[in-house]
Image (cartoon, rainbow, N blue to C red):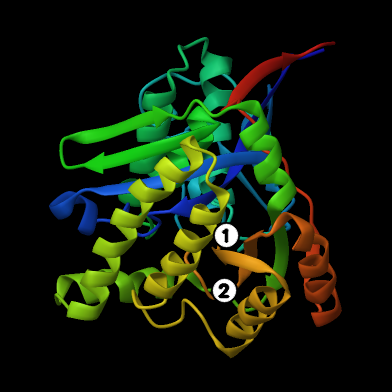
């Protein structure tokens, strides 16, 4: 029986700084993101053998099949997987084919960094297959270059590093490189944060590339409102880090609320009347602050609540039609292993 390799990379939420990791802002002014990984994962399963390279995605109900040395056609059909395989195929000799299965614990467009997590997981699976070292910085940087440069998909840098490293991190993005600063939080701080946070899937049509295109264009054109908002979001991320390290949840809630105000100024499409209604309902029910988990337009939202009001916020959002989902935080980043026979 052929050895099977499996890898998983955690999904993430970001508390502050999201958007400042997107070039050219981070290349010119430096960006920061405060994020944490959760117990939802992207998975890549690799089975070596055969004469073809087959990739199947359960999330998109799509599959591709190519010869071992056949050139890929980048046509929007599983292009990230093609980019990862091409990266390794161009550097190492594939003497056999393989079958790859990809799937996520969260739906596409969730705003939890699922696309980058899949990329990171597939890179880790191929590194395991080739018996190569798995350094998280190298994995994250490789994933970023494949996604943003080789395949040309719009986006930032935070998701790849969150998935590769795992845990609570304050990540700095500068022209000369990226630095991941792990946060040493008390266990009781994490437990209390989990208790006070309410996660809700609000759905909606989420075209994050359009939102990011507008954000990038606003910065390039030096639109004062958008640039000021990005600067404010970066400053708030530093304050959020301090609030987390000192277990000051009331201050963190206030900062999240201010961050949401600033985020909406970055580009059109980040919010809409439906999202605004959910946010205001949560605030009226006892939430101190919150935000969209990704670029905006839909997906998941989360709210930091007064502890005695978290269940009230949950019930209000549920009655409004949102889907309440329970998450916990995890420390491990991407992992790959041989599946026992």
- Image quadrant in which you'd find residue 229: bottom left
Instruction: Pick the quarter of the image with the C terminus.
Output: top right
Mark 1 is surrounded, within 10 Å at the Cα level, by few (under 14), some (14 to 19) or many (20 or more) other residues, namely: many
Q: Position of residue 199 (x, y in %)?
A: 71, 59
Q: Position of residue 23 (x, y in %)?
A: 25, 56
- Image quadrant in which you'd find residue 74: bottom left
Is residue 228 left or right of 34 when viewed as pictured?
left
In front here: 109 or 297? Answer: 297
In front here: 296 or 109? Answer: 296
In front here: 109 or 274? Answer: 274
- Looking at the image, which residue is at 45% across and 40% down? 160
- Image quadrant in which you'd find residue 209: bottom left
The residue indicated by pointer 2 is: 206
Residue 201 is labelled as: none
Give the SS element for disc 2: loop
Q: Position of residue 114 (x, y in %)?
A: 59, 50
In the depicted structure, whether residue 126 falls above or below residue 249: above
Residue 294 visible: no
Q: Residue furthest bottom?
A: 273
For marks 1 and 2 on the same chain, the one whose residue lies earlier in the sequence: 1
- Looking at the image, which residue is at 42% across and 76% down? 264
- Looking at the image, which residue is at 45% across and 12% down? 133
Is residue 333 left or right of 153 when viewed as pictured?
right
Residue 111 is labelled as: 1
**How far apart are the alpha carbons under marks 1 and 2?**
9 Å
In front here: 62 or 33? Answer: 33
Q: Are marks 1 and 2 in contact (CB under 8 Å)?
A: yes
Q: Position of residue 278 (x, y in %)?
A: 67, 79
């Amino acid at each position: 029986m052929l050895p099977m390799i499996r890898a998983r990379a955690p999904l993430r939420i970001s508390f502050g700084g999201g958007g400042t990791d997107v070039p050219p802002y981070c290349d010119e002014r430096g960006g920061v993101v405060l994020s944490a990984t959760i117990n939802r994962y992207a998975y890549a399963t690799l089975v070596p053998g055969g004469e073809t390279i087959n990739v199947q995605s359960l999330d998109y109900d799509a599959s591709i099949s190519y010869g071992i040395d056949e050139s890929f056609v980048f046509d929007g059909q599983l292009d990230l997987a093609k980019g990862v395989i091409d990266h390794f195929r161009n550097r190492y000799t594939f003497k056999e084919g393989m079958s790859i299965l990809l799937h996520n614990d969260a739906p596409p467009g969730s705003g939890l960094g699922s696309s980058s997590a899949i990329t990171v997981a597939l890179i880790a699976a191929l590194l395991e297959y080739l018996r190569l070292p798995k350094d998280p910085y190298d994995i994250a940087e490789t994933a970023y270059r494949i996604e943003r440069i080789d395949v040309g998909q719009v986006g930032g840098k935070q998701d790849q590093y969150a998935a590769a490293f795992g845990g609570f991190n304050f990540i700095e993005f500068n022209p000369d490189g990226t630095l991941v600063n792990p946060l040493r939080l008390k266990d009781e701080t994490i437990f209390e944060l989990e208790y006070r946070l309410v996660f809700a899937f609000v759905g909606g049509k989420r075209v994050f590339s359009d939102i990011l295109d507008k954000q990038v264009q606003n910065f390039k054109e030096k639109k004062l409102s958008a640039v000021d908002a990005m600067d404010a979001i970066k400053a708030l991320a530093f304050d959020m880090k301090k609030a987390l390290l000192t277990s000051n949840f009331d201050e963190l809630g206030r900062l999240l609320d201010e961050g949401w105000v600033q985020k909406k100024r970055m580009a059109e499409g980040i919010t809409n009347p439906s999202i605004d209604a959910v946010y205001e309902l949560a605030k009226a029910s006892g939430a101190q602050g919150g935000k969209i988990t990704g670029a905006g337009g839909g997906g998941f939202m989360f709210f930091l609540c007064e502890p005695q009001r978290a269940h009230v916020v949950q019930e209000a959002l549920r009655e409004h039609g949102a889907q309440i989902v329970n998450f916990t935080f995890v420390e491990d980043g991407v992992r790959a292993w041989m599946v026992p026979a």
